[in-house]
Amino acid sequence: MSRIFSGIQPSGSLHIGNYLGAVKNWAELQHKYESFFCIVDYHAITVPYEPADLRARTADMALGLLAAGLDPSKCTLFVQSMVPEHTELAWIFNTLTPLGELERQTQFKEKASKEQSVPAGLLNYPVLQAADILLYRAELVPVGEDQLQHLELSREIARKWNTRFDPPKQAYFPEPKGLLTPARRIMGLDGQAKMSKSLGNTVELLEDPKSIWEKLKPAVTDPKRVRRTDPGTPEVCNIYHLHKAFSPTETVDHVAVQCRSAGWGCIDCKKVLHESMEKELIPIRARAAEIAANPAKMKKDLAAGADHARAVASGTMKEVKEKMGLA
Ligand code: SF4
């Protein structure tokens, strides 16, 4: 069984963009692959933060992931800082990674341009990401298209280390390949940018139905549908794309017909979307309530995940250190 690794930032509660863009897919992949899913809190400290807030966001993220369908009996779910080997391997990879490569990373350039003083951790972020993946010698990484550049760097680091320290086979670390997530990019309700907490355009995975409806009502649709009688173009409308994520195929086809013929107004269309969303979100909310009622069980599951991750990680580090002449 091939091994996969993927990480998610402890950004607090999941929104439907995280869910459709990554986590829903993870819940399916855990049945097909030996899966390691990690809440990457070491990555989260590369920008300013409050310790108590980080702890709460990490717990909320764990709860969301479990509610969304990650099953600790099927996958290894853990928090990065509970497995210190991540930073140990990252240091080793730092000694092999050219500075120029890191400075060229698009995400670094974007983030650094917003900071007055740029911490080295922000620059070295993709090296830690390479360590996250290669520590488990994962062959596949479920990613969105925007993460492919970082993955390429992980492949390069694996090649470099293998060439230098694993002769003659040069294959200790597999070069991880991207497993592109089918649902890809989910736009926010403003229809302008990717769904993101910082932009305030999200629907939370555990949000109550009334509040979801209050957000859907004013959500941006086809801007050319000014009057109820104007025919629309579903492909340019974010509500149609959300239908594709939540509604059955027959409903999606029906939406397209009703939109193009102005048979439905946008509010009719949003009501049907809301119903489809509820079908998927009701069981997730129920699971979340169960998990929240038993925090000790969640803590135990995360500790067991970290124990298993650490066992694999320490095996890798033992071999890496032997090959590198380290104690
Ligand atoms: S009818 Fe539906 S798909 Fe068409 S523009 Fe309105 S909300 Fe979008």
Image (cartoon, rainbow, N blue to C red):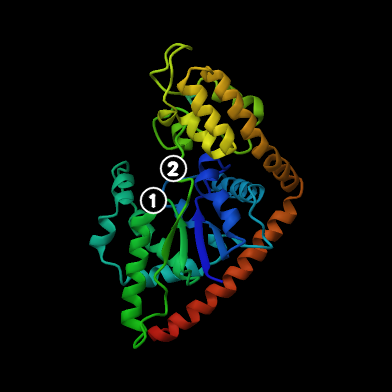
The answer to whether the beta carbon of the residue marked 1 is less than 8 Å from any atom of ligand 1 is no
Disc 1 vs disc 2: Cβ atoms closer than 8 Å? yes
Horizontal and vertical percent for residue 307?
63, 69
Give the camera-side residue of 53 and 38. 38
Work out whether mark 1 precedes mark 2 in sequence or the reverse, and give the earlier one.
Answer: 1
| Residue 145 - label | 1
Q: Quadrant of the C terminus?
A: bottom left
From the viewer's perspective, is 112 left or right of 221?
Answer: left
Place of residue 118 in the rendered image (x, y in percent of width and height, measured from the top left): 31, 50
Badge 2 amino acid: Arg
Residue 289 in the figure: left or right of residue 33:
right
Asked if 35 appears above or below 250 in the picture, the reply is below
Q: Position of residue 250 (x, y in %)?
A: 58, 35
Q: Which mark is residue 185?
A: 2
Q: Is residue 156 above or below residue 192?
A: below
Q: Is the residue marked by circle 1 packed among few (<14), some (14-19), or many (20+) residues within 10 Å?
A: few
